[in-house]
Amino acid sequence: MSNNVNKAASRAIISKYINKETLKYVFTTHFWGPVSNFGIPIAAIYDLKKDPSLISGPMTLALVVYSGVFMKYAMAVTPKNYLLLGCHIINETAQLGQGFRFLQYNYLTDKPKIEAAENTSNK
């Protein structure tokens, strides 16, 4: 009897999530656009550990603005695209972190001391 209950529960879960509407959604740009776009925030998160001298201030600013615009767009389309919104929230957060690192390295720290410390540690 328990086996029949497990099969029925499995069928109910499968039919709830794997149905025509779900499959229809998976084959749309409403789904694949945000999925393919997740490369940007993944790269930004990975770059948070790299040397701050490599950060491009203008590019970081452009990506902050880009994500802000597309967060608004994700809520303006019908139906609302929560996957796109999530992608750009993550990207906005990562890019703001990069922007803070850029500002701190270029404007809030004493570069000669940093370069002297790097030169002594490389010897």
Image (cartoon, rainbow, N blue to C red):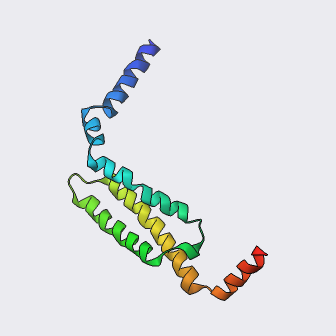
Q: Residue furthest front?
A: 123
Percent position of residue 46, x then y: 54, 60
Q: Residue at x 38, y 73 (%)?
A: 62
- Is residue 48 depicted above or below 112 in this figure? above
Q: Quadrant of residue 77?
A: bottom left
Quadrant of res 4: top left
Left or right of residue 94, residue 16 in this image: left
| Quarter of the view holding residue 10 | top left
Q: What number of labels is visible? A: 0
- What residue is rendered at 57% in x and 76% in y? 53
Q: Residue furthest top?
A: 1
Left or right, 98 with respect to 115, comes to left
Is residue 14 positioned above or below 30 on the image? above
Residue 1: image x %, image y %? Answer: 44, 11
10 or 46, nearer to the observer: 46
Q: Residue at x 50, y 70 (%)?
A: 97
Which quadrant of the figure contains the C terminus?
A: bottom right
Between 112 and 20, the one nearer to me in the picture:
112
Q: Looking at this view, is 104 or 15 the one in front?
A: 104
At horizontal 46% and vertical 71% (from top left) the residue drawn is 96
> Which residue is situated farthest in the right direction here?
123
The image shows residue 68 at horizontal and vertical percentages of 34, 68
**In the image: residue 37, left or right of residue 108:** left
